[in-house]
Amino acid sequence: MTVRIAKNAASMPVTMDGLEGRVLLSGNVTASVASGILVMKGDAAANEIVMTRSGLSANQIRISSGSSATTINGAAGPLVLDGVRGLKVQLMGGNDNLKLDNANFDRAVSIDAGGGNDLVQIEANGSKSGPASVFGAAVSVSMGSGVDGLQVGIKGQKGNHATFRGAVKFNGGLSRDVLIYNEVGGLAGGSVVAFESINPVTAAGINLRSAKSFGILAGAGVSNTGGTIINGNLGTHPTGTITGSPTVNGVTHSADPIALQAKVDLTAAYNEAKGRAGTPTKVLAGELSGLTLAPGVYKRASSVKLSSGHVTLDAKGNPNAVFIFQIGTTLTTLSGTQLILAGGAQARNIYWQVGSSATLGTTSKFKGTIMADQSVTLAHLATLEGRALARIGAVTLDSNTVTVPT
């Protein structure tokens, strides 16, 4: 296998911290089938495209826009097309994300990411027990001129993977590009070119142990108002009080041995996050509004606030990238603010160690595991893709949705 390194790569360390921030703005994608080939073309905007055959017949494929507002042929998706045997994609100029899972092709597949900072993921989003994507003919992926990421499969995951039966050509393009593919060593020589980083070493996440299954975990009880939904377990110990009857799509543990063990494991995880050292540890600003942050360990001795707009966490094309935030006192997000994930960042890899208490403002949208020494409060209609874990104090909820990330 030959990997071409850019001429100036020797003068700069190969990391992913230098990539630009990516926020999906959403445009339009055209899609049509001609002679068995699905032809897709993006525009100059940033688009997210999700393609799968799950639940469909042979030679059918479903195209949707994932979490973005990308339209397909000028309309909201999803769109199901028939007679698909091959694929030709041109993403064009935006910062795009293409996800391809459970989609078999017996004819050639060609993906051209074009300009922009793009992320292409093949069999990186399906379930562990899901079917593989089988590529029966030649596959060509060109990442184009931006700072891009190509991910094939999930590290250490069996059963849900990509199978290539024809020739493979992965071309990183012109900039500092990243390839994540466990089986890259099994490809024929010359299959991979122009990637400056292949299977980069990623910092480990925080080991939550038994606390991992809890969306809400408290020390001094849980208080709820309104129609809160918790997609995960709920627990409290030593105080077993739970008021307001939230909907728990999991198991409730009130001052029982399982809640006790989860609290012990939370303390261990809290201390691990607090003591984690980065290479180096980065200084975290007290105001997060408008920032784009790369993976790493961030530390601030005092409070942190998201006052307006959004903060973006950009994984730089590495969906395994870890973000750890060490906050000395309080974490506060104000009304209507949001945390945006870009570049393949995953909520499951984000950890907020908070020295006192955390508060998520009304209608704010937040992501990651919050481990607060004291209390956690989610104001009216705030949503959390992550966990609200309070070591000593209570967790207070008000018509929220909390979903444990997978």
Image (cartoon, rainbow, N blue to C red):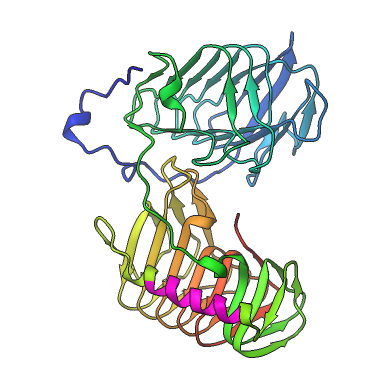
Image point (56%, 73%), residue name: 388
Q: Position of residue 403 (x, y in %)?
A: 65, 63
Quadrant containing the C terminus in the rendered view: bottom right
Q: Position of residue 6 (x, y in %)?
A: 26, 24
Q: Is residue 332 shown left or right of residue 401?
A: left
Q: Is residue 399 left or right of residue 236?
A: right
Q: Residue furthest right?
A: 57
Tag count: 0
Q: Quadrant of the N terminus?
A: top left
Residue 30 image point, x, y percent: 68, 25
Secondary structure, magenta segment, majority class: helix
- The answer to whether residue 144 is visible is no
**Front position in the image: 57 or 93:** 57
Q: Name the one closer to the observer, 182 or 316.
A: 182
Task: In the rendered view, tell whether residue 278 sits above or below residue 326.
Answer: above
| Residue projecting furthest to the front | 257
Which percent across, then down, holds residue 73? 72, 28
Q: Residue at x 58, y 28 (%)?
A: 162
Quadrant location of residue 405?
bottom right
User: Is 114 placed above or below 203 here?
Assistant: above
Q: Which residues are magenta?
A: 259-271
Q: Is residue 202 magenta?
A: no
**Quarter of the figure with residue 184:** top left
Residue 256 image-quadrant placement: bottom right
Residue under the point 53% across and 30% down:
44
Find the residue positioned furthest to the left: 11
Q: Say if 376 sits above or below 72 in the image.
A: below
Residue nearest the viewer, comparing 341 with 239? 239
Q: Is residue 75 left or right of residue 383?
A: right
